Image: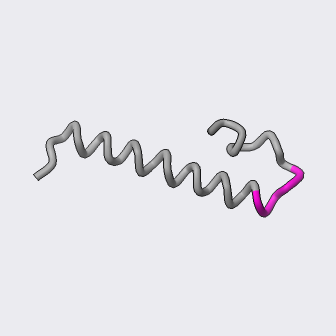
């Protein structure tokens, strides 16, 4: 069993990772938008 803290950490990492993947996808499909999410990571 995971503790509550470990669950939060895991969720935070997964959330950041999925945001990163999302920003990569949108960055690839929308080249004109170069100051989008991808620049934050």
Left or right of 25? Residue 7 is: left
Q: Residue at x 35, y 47 (%)?
A: 11
On the image, the x and y values in percent for residue 1 come to 10, 52
For image coordinates 32% across by 47% down, the residue present is 10
Q: Quadrant of residue 35?
A: top right
Query: For the point 18% across and 40% down, which residue is it?
Result: 4
- Where residue 27 sits: x, y (%)? 75, 54
State how many labels appear.
0
For the C terminus, the image quarter is top right
In terms of image quadrants, where is residue 5? top left
Residue interval drawn in magenta: 28-32
The residue furthest left is 1
List x then y, in percent, for residue 3.
14, 42
Magenta-highlighted stretch: main secondary structure? loop
* Left or right of residue 38, residue 32 in this image: right
17 up-or-down from 3: above or below: below
* Left or right of residue 12: residue 21: right
Q: Magenta span has 30?
A: yes
Q: How is the image coloured?
A: one colour
Residue 16 located left or right of residue 20 = left
**Residue located at (25% from left, 45% from top):** 7
């Amino acid at each position: 069993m995971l503790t509550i803290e470990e669950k939060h950490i895991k969720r935070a990492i997964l959330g950041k990772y999925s945001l990163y993947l999302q920003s990569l996808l949108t960055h690839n499909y929308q080249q004109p938008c170069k100051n989008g999410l991808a620049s934050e990571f």
